[in-house]
Image (cartoon, helix red, strand yellow):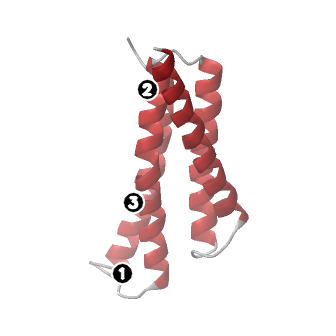
Amino acid sequence: MTFHITALYAGLCGLLIIYLAFNVTGFRKRRVSEGHADFGAMQVAIRAHGNATEYIPIALILLLLAEQGGTTSFWLHLLGAAFVASRYAHAYGYITSQGGASRGRFFGTATCFLVITILAIINIVGFIRF
């Protein structure tokens, strides 16, 4: 069985993680080789990358399991697209506000949590029905 839908969203998330990693390494080349040296923009870059790596894996695992469990492609695409959009919005909002409050960060976080919650429920219900 192939999991083409999850592969699409994993690829898009992978590109975001690489972009955020390059953002961190760019600062490392220019300013700080280790840690963040209390350099605010460096701290923001590190946390933007870290935040993505904290939430993306669990969402993709849940999406994959939902796909494997037979969730329709409509729901998989809706949830996958919403999740990817949430992570891009969060990263953009976090970086442009330098870690402060922003609409992108707020809506990105809220949508991320909502998608993960829905996927978790889909998987739990799928287990109960099995």
- Can residue 108 be seen from the camera position used here? yes
**Residue wearing tag 1:** 36
Percent x, y of residue 51:
46, 60
Q: Where is the C terminus found, in terms of image quarters?
A: top left
Q: Which mark is residue 21?
A: 3
SS category of the residue bearing label 1: loop
Distance, label 3 to label 2, CA atoms, is 27 Å
Front residue (pair 82, 27): 82
Q: How many marks?
A: 3
Characterize the local packing of mark 3: few (<14), some (14-19) or many (20 or more) Cα atoms within 10 angstroms.
some
Q: Is the residue under label 1 in contact with that under label 3 (CB below 8 Å)?
A: no
Q: Nearer the viewer, mark 3 or mark 1?
A: 1
Percent x, y of residue 33:
27, 78
Distance, label 3 to label 1, CA atoms, is 14 Å
Q: Residue at x 57, y 69 (%)?
A: 95
Which amino acid lies under the numbered mark 2 shown in the image of this protein?
Leu
Q: Is residue 98 above or below residue 72?
A: below
Characterize the local packing of mark 2: few (<14), some (14-19) or many (20 or more) Cα atoms within 10 angstroms.
some
Direction from residue 68 to residue 87 in the image, left or right = right
SS category of the residue bearing label 2: helix
Q: Is residue 38 above or below residue 116?
A: below
**Residue wearing tag 2:** 65
Percent x, y of residue 114:
63, 45
Q: Residue at x 48, y 83 (%)?
A: 40
Direction from residue 110 to residue 119 in the image, left or right = left
Distance, label 2 to label 1, CA atoms, is 37 Å
- Can residue 6 be seen from the camera position used here? no
